Amino acid sequence: MDWIDLAVILAALAVGGILTLPALARAPLWRAALTPLASIIGSGFLVLGPILAISYGRWAPLAMAALCVAAYALGGAVRANIARRAAGPRTRAEEALDRAASWVLAFAYIISVAYYLGLFGAFALERTGIASDISQRGLTTAVFLVILVTGWTKGFAALERMEQVAVSLKLAVIGGLLAGMATVFATASGPASPGLTDAPASVTGWAALSLAFGLIVTVQGFETSRYLGAEYDPATRNRSMRLAQIVSTAIYMGYVLLLTALFDPSHMSMSETAIIALMDQIAPSLPLLLILAALVAQFSAAVADTGGAGGLLAELTSDRIAPRTGYALLAAFGIALTWSADIYAIIAYASRAFALYYALQCAIAARGHWTEARLPALWYSALSLTALAMALFGTPVEGG
């Protein structure tokens, strides 16, 4: 074991140890932040770095910052709606928009499960020697069926307990990854001479903007705080959402800055598991740790969104569609999507669905503030139109 591997493992153990401290594990704010943080990190960390580096070149950190700022602004609308909902009755227009948003979110969950399990299939087979489109899609289909059978027969209570383990493992591995990359950067012994890349962007103008629109799902997940009302009060949910977004922004920015400092985008491949080959050049321990974290995190996220979609469909139809029927519909749609689209197309579909959800959330916030504070209402209206543009014009990565 070389000393970079040692730095990776020690950092991962340190982060994991901190996350298991009883004082932190029991803190209501941190526990409330775990759900949105797990969703945000699970949504994009594995695939986003190479996509941004290859597509935006020297501008990749700026693109990452723009995605994080956009997510925080959209999160502000969700937080405003949480506070207003707690303050008292809302208008009929707000309630109608909220119901429409819930339908859109249920559909977005269905697409996101296909995204999570598509990544699961890719990472599970990465080092087996049998990875191919057919084998990955076959494994993804099998996991869809496992989740369906589990939800149909026993429910997800046991599997949902994986969430805290999954997020702790993922954050520990990310801590090790960042420590390894930072160590290589500091000692100038990496695969390339440290220093931010000067590579030009491979997409520019409208193509660059529409691609960013199609990547919004990679910073999505903060909205889950909106649905934790049975466990936490509105103030805690809003504070925990902010905390989750701040922590995830710090992680994403550190990751993309180090990635673009250590690797030449021209040597990267546009594949969902490209990060594995890159991290193999940092430390031999990282690929296995990343694969383990990916499998746990993607499966846990898929279970959570399957349960969320089933519950939403039951609520929206007054139980005419039972949760387990919702699971079956999700599995059928997800399997069809798995066999008809590649992972980059699914990312774009999920981004557009979540962008439409955020457009509706912003519209709710605009309507709620219209008679009380006109300036915030105009801000949320502009955000709603921006999110609607994301939903209409988001495009997938080319060359995946």
Image: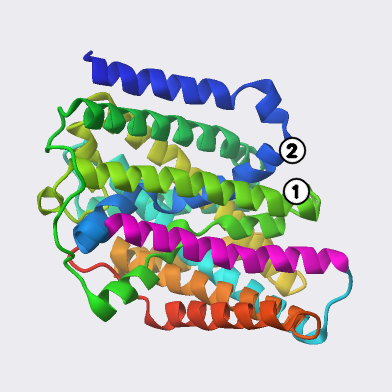
Q: Secondary structure at mark 1?
A: helix
Magenta stretch, residue numbers? 60-87
Residue situated in front as seen by the camera: 21 or 165: 21
* Quadrant where the image shows the C terminus: bottom left
Q: Residue 334's x, y, as percent?
A: 44, 64
Could you tell me if residue 88 is visible in this image? yes
Residue situated in front as seen by the camera: 195 or 56: 195
Residue situated in front as seen by the camera: 75 or 300: 75
Residue situated in front as seen by the camera: 204 or 36: 204
Q: Which mark is residue 28?
A: 2
- Residue 284 drawn in magenta: no
Q: Residue 24's x, y, as percent?
A: 66, 28
Q: Residue 291's x, y, as percent?
A: 33, 36
User: Mark 2 near mark 1, Cβ–Cβ under 8 Å?
Assistant: yes
Could you tell me if residue 150 is visible in this image? no
Left or right of residue 384, residue 337 in this image = left
- The answer to whether 199 is drawn above or below residue 157 in the figure is below
C-alpha separation, residue under disc 2 versus residue under disc 1: 8 Å
Q: Secondary structure at mark 2?
A: helix
**Mark 2 / mark 1, whichever is N-terminal:** 2
Colour scheme of the picture:
rainbow
